[in-house]
Amino acid sequence: MRVHRPGLLACALAALALAAAAPARAQAPPPGVSPDLLDPEGSTGDVGSALGGAIGPVVTIEDIQIAGNRSTSTRLIERSLPFRRGDQLRVSDPRLARARWKLLALGYFREVDLALRRGTRHGQVIVTVVVAERGTVALNRLWFGTSAVAPWWLGADVGDRNFLGSGLALGGGAAYASAGAIVGARPQWAGELRLSAPALGGTRWGAHGAISGQHGSEPYRVSGPPGSGDADDLRAFGYRRLGVRGGPAYTLSSLSSVVADLRVEAIDAAVPIAPTRRLPDGRVTAIDLGLRRGDSRVVSVGLGYTRDNRPDPSLPHQGTRVEVVGELGTSLLGGSYDFAVLLGRYDRFWPLTHKSALGLRLAGGTVIGDAPRFDRIHVGDVDRMLAPRVMGMTTALTAPLDLLGTDNADTVYGEVGGSVTVEYVYQWWRRPHRIYGGDLFVAAGVWTLATTDELRLRDRDAFAALPVDLMVDVGLRIDTEIGVFEFALANALGRVPRW
């Protein structure tokens, strides 16, 4: 495939390419304290177990005083502490170190300092907690670009991790994509509203809920060579989606949590009857568009687990993040699709020097059964050099670069896929205000994506049936008060057309 230079507008868009900030994130642990030493499994508050590993005289907490909070309620801060008034502890009690970590993990504060001073009576102390708040409003995602499918698209996702200081997380997004010259295409738009309570009544239990909708136009290929961007070789069908999801969450420790989810979604799709594609050799083959014609429903239950012990999740240089998500859709609950999805992600960083680190990122999963099109793995999910879906909407059908010549130009959706990426990061700067830091990074890896039919009905071994290819990236990652942004080569390539 030959890549031509984009026009002036495309170059400007590429130069300004931004990737979204990570969702509400934990902050660094106290200076000099490794998160693995902070009793990551938490404490039940039992005095005997809490004092067992500490040394020094036993004292009683007479009072807890909070200072520095302007928008975060004092009650919310006190609920997050692993001790209460009247508890007993020693000066070296690990709950003091863990308290700083738990408060920083809320994502509301840049700094947290704890101090003990004498109380009004012998054997009593007053715990003083001084916090420095950071902005809790974050730009979680920013979408824009141009392609043959959508001449332009634009969208943003914004969230407040501590709405009005209540501890509630409120967020939402909206996106719009114009219609291209493809037959059947129409303008697309989507929106979502989310609300979550990380801690209900100061307990380990939380809850979350969301409502989302899309008015979309899904493109598919009907003729021409693989990867062709000619509008005459493509068609599109319209659809509407409206869904709600929600469920409980439970904090296992200051570093890990589980989330359960119930999803109910209505789909109305104008899927063509018996769609086909004419291959370059003249053969005509049927196309699976992955949706029921007319009205259909998705009803599923899901469960997710996350553990993150990276000291700085925004610009990581050490630590590990593990995330596993499973979803089961079934007609037994009234849905139209029976399927299962299992996705996982593993990130690990090793410091090389005080300013550089090496990272390994693994991500992948599988989809089993009759999953709707939107729940299958998209090539933009595994190849960071392509445009991702925008709030579930497809805005580009750009073929992968095919750097290894593995014939992957037709790869769009699959049931088995993943990526392995190695990343070198270098700390450029750190500062305490507004723009907190910046890292230069260079990344390279491999990705793969295949359908179950490609693996099952093949005339070659399984490894050869999986289209494997390379991806590379280089850029600047910046942590700011409103989120983390990436100015990167891969972002630019995914936002401009290639002919």
Image: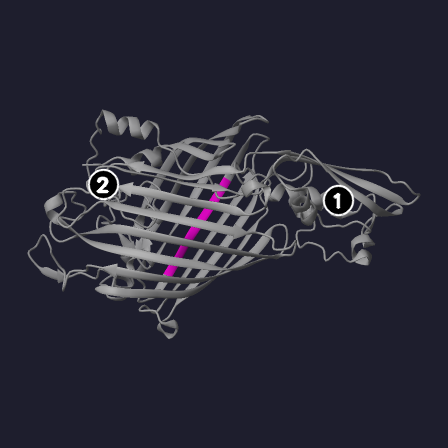
- Quadrant of image for the C terminus: top left
Query: Element type at marker 2?
Result: loop
Residue 368 image position (x, y, % from top left): 35, 66
Q: Say which of 366 and 129 sits in front.
A: 129
Q: Is residue 78 magenta?
A: no
127 vs 247: above or below:
above
Looking at the image, residue 416 sits to the left or right of residue 459; the answer is right
Looking at the image, residue 384 sits to the left or right of residue 5; the answer is right
Quick one: label 2, few (<14), some, or many (20+) residues within 10 Å? some
Quick one: label 1, few (<14), some, or many (20+) residues within 10 Å? many
Label placed on residue 383? none
Which residue is outermost to the bottom?
332
Amino acid carrying label 2: it is Ser
Of mark 1 and mark 2, the one earlier in the sequence is 1
Question: Is residue 247 shown to the viewer in this render?
Answer: yes
What range is drawn magenta here? Answer: 359-366
68 vs 272: above or below:
above
Amino acid carrying label 1: it is Leu
Question: Is residue 292 shown to the viewer in this render?
Answer: no
- Residue displayed at 32% across by 65% down: 297
* Circle 1 residue: 96
- Residue displayed at 25% across by 50% down: 216
* Circle 2 residue: 178
For discs 1 and 2, the disc positioned in front in the rendered view: 2
Query: Element type at marker 1?
Result: helix
Looking at the image, residue 445 sits to the left or right of residue 180; the answer is right
Residue 272 image position (x, y, % from top left): 15, 60
Q: CA distance from mark 1 to mark 2?
A: 54 Å
- Quadrant of image for the N terminus: top left
Looking at the image, residue 42 sits to the left or right of residue 312; the answer is right
Q: Say which of 460 and 274 sits in front.
A: 274
486 vs 42: above or below:
above
